[in-house]
Image (cartoon, rainbow, N blue to C red):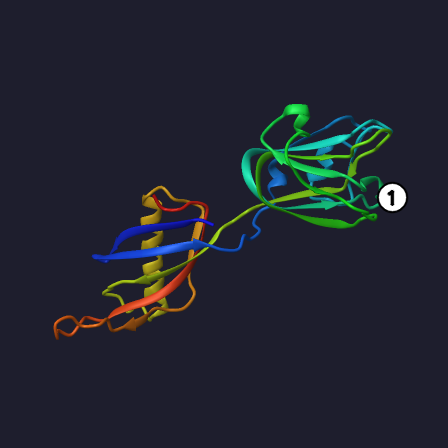
Amino acid sequence: MWVFRCLFVLYGAGVYFTTQASTPQQEENLALRGKTVQSSNYHPYVAAYAIDGQPSTFSSTAASTDNPWWRLDLLDSYHIAEIVITNRVSCCGERLNGAEIHIGNSLENNGNNNPRCAVLGAVVTAQSVSLFCGGMRGRYVNVIIPGSQKILSLAEVQVYKKVHQAVMSLKFNSSLNVADPAESGKLLYQMTTALISKGHSNFTLTWTKLPQKVKPKSKQGNPAKSAPSTAFTGASSQGCS
């Protein structure tokens, strides 16, 4: 879990907030823009068929080889939240039983020495299995079946990275009528601009509820000015510096 704190100037007033990360959520299938290779090819079932978005096609290694493997290069290193493996539709579902999924940044032993995320149990024809890798970081995703005289066939491999969701509580002064959805939208826009100006990207800010006016405690008998207060959520790949 990460925590970050930031101070921005919005509408002439300082805004201070603290955030904490919570549950990861899915986004795009990273496999669709990756590159693949496998230990051998059973023509014409090349490795790329396992990331073409079509479960009716499949990749396959040559018949009866030892420790057949398939590798996906994500082209960058990611914290992996989930991998979905789909078995081939036509036949031979049992071939995928015992397959190991490895994630990491090393190409030692063709990537098969990277840390293991999971081992598949009994998988039936056309079945999709979701594997949750707990944010393991890596550029390469390998599927390997240990043993002799094996065939590795994959209909589809999907990979989803970990995305942080943060909840922030704020107190601020604003000349806008922030109880108005249109005006509160302007405030979110300025917060977004402030984050971008500090080098942050790939995030979205939304309100969990519209701002409400609060009345701070007065000091030395002087009435205090009221200020709106609210909370909002954001999905961000970075914290604040």
Kind of residue sitting beneath label 1: Cys
Front residue of 135 and 125? 135
- Residue 239 placement (x, y as % from top left): 40, 46
- Which quadrant is home to the C terminus? top left
| Quarter of image, res 146 | top right
Q: Is residue 82 left or right of residue 78?
A: right
| Quarter of image, res 197 | top left
- Above or below residue 31? Residue 24 is below
Q: Residue furthest front?
A: 220
Front residue of 21 and 13? 21
Q: Is residue 45 left or right of residue 214?
A: right
**Residue at 80% in and 41% down:** 96
Front residue of 27 and 80? 80
- Above or below residue 125? Residue 138 is above
- Residue 66 placement (x, y as % from top left): 82, 27
Residue tagged by mark 1?
A: 91
Q: Is residue 24 left or right of residue 125?
A: left
Tell me the crowding category of disc 1: few under 14, some 14 to 19, or many 20 or more residues within 10 angstroms, Cα based: few
**Residue at 78% in and 44% down:** 87
Q: Secondary structure at mark 1?
A: loop
| Quarter of image, res 69 | top right
- Residue 132 placement (x, y as % from top left): 64, 48
**Residue at 76% in and 44% down:** 120
| Tally of numbered tags | 1
- Above or below residue 156? Residue 177 is below
- Residue 104 placement (x, y as % from top left): 60, 33
